[in-house]
Amino acid sequence: MQFPSWRAAAGFLIGFGAVALPMLAPAQTADDADPRLAFRRPLEIPVPSDNPYTPAKALLGERLFHDVRLSGNDSRSCATCHAPAKAWQDGLKTGLGIHGDPLPRRTPSLADTAFAKIQFWDGRAATLEAQAFGPIENPNEMNMPREGLIEKLRASRPLVAEFAKAFPERPAITAETVAAALATFERTLRSGESPFDRFVAGDDGALSPAARRGFDLFRGK
C-alpha cells in the first residue's frame, strides 16, 4: 500500500513508525527456557470486528487527523496536540486548550494506543472509536459539536468521495464513520524498536550488564 508522507518525513526520523496492516503470526508465550518472551513486542495489532482495517479507511483517518475543520474555529487538528514530530504528543507539562489556557492533564502519546485496554487517563472510553469525539466536542479542547462537524465535512465534495471509498457499505459521512476512520489510523501508530525490544527478542548484547541486572531485579521478588 502507499505509506502516508508523515512516516518518512517525521515518524521514522524520530524512531516512531506505523504498521499499516495487522501482522499475522503465532502468539508467543513465556516459558521456563526463556522468560523474556513474555516481554516481546506484540506481533499483531488488535482490530475490532466491527471496524476492520482497510488502507482507504486508514488514509482517510490520517487526513481527518490533520484537518483543522475538526475544531470549532478551524485553528487546530488532532495533530496539534498529538504531533508526529513529538512522538504523537505535544511535549508540554499539560496540554493547551483551544483558547490557549492550560488543560488539567498532560497530552498522552498515541504511539501503541492500539494495545491500550482503555482510553483517556481516567479510562472513561473503552475503545479508540468511543474516544474519538471526546477531545473534538470538549469546549476547552477542540470545541466542535458533532452535528456541526458532520455538516461541515459533508460540504466538502472531495471528503464525501473519500468517505464513500473508505466505507462503501455506509458511504454517508456520520459521527460513526468519522470515529471509525480516526481510530483506524491511530491503530497504525507504533513505537520504534528499542534496545530492550531487541534484548527480549534474543539479542543478548542489546542491553548493558547494568540494564540486564535491572531486568532481573524487575522480574524477581
Image: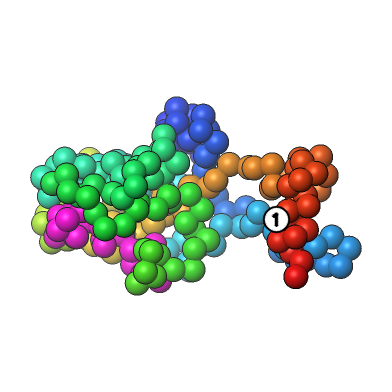
Front residue (pair 127, 36)? 36
In this view of the protein, can residue 168 be seen by the observer? no
> Start and end of the magenta stretch?
125-145
Asked if residue 57 lies left or right of residue 139, the reply is: right
Asked if residue 48 lies left or right of residue 146, the reply is: right
Q: Kindly indicate the quadrant of the structure image that contains residue 198.
A: top right
Element on which disc 1 rests = loop
What's the residue type where badge 1 is placed? Arg
For image coordinates 81% across by 48% down, the residue present is 202
Spot occupied by residue 45 in the image (x, y as percentages of width and height) = 56, 57
Asked if residue 42 lies left or right of residue 88, the reply is: right
Spot occupied by residue 218 in the image (x, y as percentages of width and height) = 71, 61
For image coordinates 23% across by 47% down, the residue present is 96
Within 10 Å of disc 1 (Cα), the crowding (few <14, some 14-19, many 20+) is some
Spot occupied by residue 75 in the image (x, y as percentages of width and height) = 16, 40
Front residue (pair 3, 108)? 108
Dividing the image into 4 quarters, which one contains the C terminus? Answer: bottom right
* Residue hosting label 1: 40
Confirm whether the magenta stretch covers residue 90. Answer: no
> Measured along the vertical axis of the image, is residue 146 above or below residue 110?
below
